[in-house]
Image: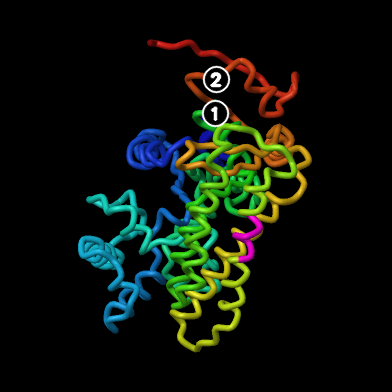
Amino acid sequence: PALLTGKRIVVATATKALQDQLAAKDLPFLEAHLGRPFDWAVLKGRSNYICMQRVRELQSTSAQGQLEIEDFAATTKVEIKRLCEWSGDTKTGDQADLTWSPADRSWQAVSVGSDECPGGTKCPMGSVCFAELARSRATVADVVVVNLHLYGLNVASGNMLLPEHEVVVIDEAHQLEDIMSDTVGVQIGPGRFTNLAAVVRRIIDDPAIVGGLAEAAPAIREALRPFAGERLTKPFPDAVQDALIDSRGRIEKAQSALRAIETDVPEAQQRKIRAQQVATRVQEQIDVALGQHEGYVAFVSGSPDNARLEIAPLDVGPVLSAGIWTKRTAILTSATLPATLPHRVGLHDGTYSQIDVGSPF
């Protein structure tokens, strides 16, 4: 029915598996039987696409016998080689299109996250970037399929990630509140510093700097461990406050070293830019955590061994109202919509209609 209106539609669903189901089954079925032509595209976060710049860097270091490729385990090197070869054959670069499942370490070596990527215009391989290609397809498609996390990031960014659209279909809408809370808020855990150390290590061969970043991970873990499952007061307990401040200082030392790097080698320039971007992003999140939290709540989620600090809005309603409800038609669907959902996501009486179509189960 949404297609028949002729409006541009974004379908946001809960998981990448559901995205792939729409792309592989449901949309091709509609395309064959609807009797009306339409274009559709699937758009995922950058880390789901192989990065051609990373492929070029890895192939370069491999050919020269340099450290980065040699540092991987033998099985990981084999998988990275297969992924690099696949990058020359694939039309989408989407990990979901692989016929085999690489280890996480192998895929991380050939992909970059949104915090790390400088964008297509600043990257030497931007013209052949699979993530940019997917975005280009999305800008002209009648239907764009995304996951809820990407849609939440789009709302948080002021609609900077997705093309303009008149209708959004939010599937699995019972997860909307939690996912929006995650994407609008801040999360700081040990993994942030482990990843940052790995990115910086690609361009800085200084054990003191790289080791300092890596050591921040267990320091943050130990500081958060006693508070797992608890809400934090402001200011934070001394152990948490001190760990955040110390970690920020370690990042600043890395930033100084990165700024001092001068190179004409394009691959090295890109490593430097990506390291600076990730470092800046983590610094910004620490600054948010250490600042005032008007309208937000700070708590420690996860288990004691995998605790992370989260700063989340007490009420996602205003964010959703400004980012979705006042801008476009929204259809929220789920097999398990709670009766309280409208008020929890900022929909006021008289501004929405509701229908229960029963169940065959």
Q: Does residue 2 appear in this view?
A: yes
Q: Residues within 10 Å of mark 2 (few under 14, many from 20)?
A: some
Badge 1 marks a residue whose secondary structure is helix
Residue 317 higher or lower than 236, as above or below: above
Find out whether the residues at labels 2 and 1 contact each other: C-beta distance under 8 Å.
Answer: yes
The residue where tag 2 is placed is 337
Residue at 70 percent across and 33 percent down: it is 314
Which residue is nearer to you in this view: 101 or 49? Answer: 101
Above or below 45: residue 297: above
Q: Which mark is residue 284?
A: none
| Relative to 73, 329 lies left or right | right
Q: Is residue 137 left or right of residue 176?
A: left
Q: Mark 1 Cα within 10 Å, few/some/many (few <14, many 20+)?
A: many
Q: Is residue 347 left or right of residue 5?
A: right
User: In the image, 173: left or right of 18?
Assistant: right
Q: Which residues are magenta?
A: 244-249
Spot occupied by residue 283 in the image (x, y as percentages of width and height)? 63, 60
Amino acid beneath label 1: Ala
Which residue is drawn at the image coordinates 63% and 22% (left, top)?
A: 341
Q: Rounded to the nearest whole Å, what is the CA distance between mark 2 and mark 1? A: 7 Å
Where does residue 139 sit, x and y in percent of width and height? 54, 54
Q: Amino acid at mark 2?
A: Leu
Note whether 19 is above or below 95 in the view shown. above
Per the rendering, the mark at residue 173 is 1
Q: Is residue 218 magenta?
A: no
Q: Main secondary structure of the magenta part?
A: helix
For the rendered model, the colour scheme is rainbow
Q: Residue at x 62, y 49 (%)?
A: 164
Observer able to see residue 326: no
Nearest the viewer among 5 and 273 is 273
